[in-house]
């Protein structure tokens, strides 16, 4: 994910996830078997009431170079998107364009984002429910134009663990005033669904995340991923499991316990992605 000689741009929004990401990478930089540079970058989108002094003041206390990019994407979003409609899509595209442009001009080799495991699972369900596709946020991604590598070092971290870590570190959290007030966003509905599953069926969310790295294209219906038309009787299955995948699942459902303590089953430590 991070290689020797990389210049890593850490995108800092002021939320718990990006603060945690920066803190982890700064500590990793001291002990990693490879040498890499870090630069913290925040995009000031000019939302009304945004406390623009918070991030510069915080970053000035750290031993790391940083840059505050000022770009009024807020006005563009408000002008284009009707009142009450979801702003996240356009906001993300504008933000991505500004970040990619800055990265290219400054020799950035990796762009680090603070998305975590729960973000990835939520995105999977959003795409299935509303986009008609099975895709999510990969831990490592090449941009469409091939010029940028995006990494998500917190990909295997639980949001609840990140929240506890951020609270312990007392990061100066900045809320997102542009889109955070839209309570009926579909992502929020998905988050509530997953949280409800996690309470009722401990382990289900972990199983969903495991499934994202255990895909059998031969047992889906995407002709771009698997040559169904070219199948013949003398061709062995390319995926371990073959027709045994038609059998009933072999698993033991988790036993329900009315006195189950949700926190007792959650990990108290954050898992990190290995460099390599």
Image (spheres, rainbow, N blue to C red):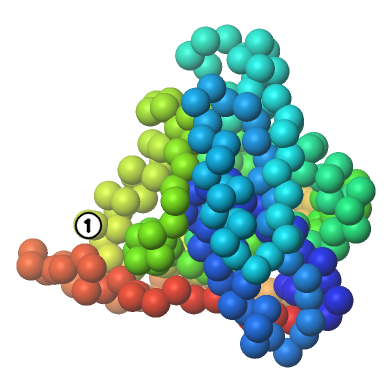
Instruction: Report x, y in % for residue 181.
Output: 42, 27
Vertical arrangement, residue 144 with respect to residue 271, above or below: above
Label 1: how many residues lie within 10 Å, few (<14), some (14-19) or many (20+)? some
* Relative to 108, 201 lies left or right: left
Along the viewing direction, whichever of 127 and 137 lies nearer the viewer:
137
Please report the residue visible at 23 percent of the width from the left and 68 percent of the height from the top: 263
Please report the residue visible at 52 percent of the width from the left and 31 percent of the height from the top: 50
Q: How many marks?
A: 1
Which quarter of the image is occupied by the C terminus? Answer: bottom right
Which quarter of the image is occupied by the N terminus? Answer: bottom right
Instruction: Report x, y in % for residue 43.
Output: 68, 40
Vertical arrangement, residue 152 with respect to residue 181, above or below: below
Please report the residue visible at 77 percent of the width from the left and 44 percent of the height from the top: 99
Please report the residue visible at 41 percent of the width from the left and 37 percent of the height from the top: 188
**In this figure, which residue is indicated by the disc labeled 1?**
200
Q: Quadrant of residue 242?
A: bottom right
């Amino acid at each position: 994910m991070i290689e020797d000689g990389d210049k890593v741009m850490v995108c800092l929004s002021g939320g718990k996830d990006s603060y945690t990401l920066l803190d982890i990478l700064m500590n990793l930089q001291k002990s990693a078997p490879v040498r890499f540079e870090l630069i913290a970058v925040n995009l000031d989108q000019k939302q009304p009431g945004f406390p623009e002094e918070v991030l510069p003041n915080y970053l000035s206390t750290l031993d790391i170079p940083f840059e505050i990019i000022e770009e009024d994407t807020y006005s563009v979003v408000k002008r284009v998107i009707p009142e009450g409609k979801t702003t996240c899509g356009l906001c993300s595209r504008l933000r991505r364009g500004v970040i990619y442009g800055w990265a290219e001009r400054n020799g950035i080799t990796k762009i680090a984002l603070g998305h975590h495991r729960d973000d990835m699972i939520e995105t999977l369900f959003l795409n299935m429910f509303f986009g008609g596709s099975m895709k999510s946020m990969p831990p490592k991604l090449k941009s469409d134009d091939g010029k940028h590598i995006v990494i998500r070092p917190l990909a295997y971290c639980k949001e609840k663990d990140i929240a506890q870590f951020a609270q312990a570190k007392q990061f100066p959290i900045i809320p997102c005033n542009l889109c955070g007030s839209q309570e009926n966003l579909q992502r929020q509905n998905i988050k509530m669904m997953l949280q409800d599953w996690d309470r009722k069926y401990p382990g289900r969310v972990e199983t969903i995340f495991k499934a994202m790295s255990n895909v059998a294209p031969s047992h889906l219906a995407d002709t771009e991923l698997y040559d169904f038309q070219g199948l013949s009787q003398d061709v062995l299955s390319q995926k371990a499991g073959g027709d045994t995948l038609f059998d009933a699942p072999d698993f033991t459902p988790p036993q329900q316990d009315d006195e189950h303590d949700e926190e007792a089953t959650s990990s108290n430590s954050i898992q990190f992605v290995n460099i390599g």
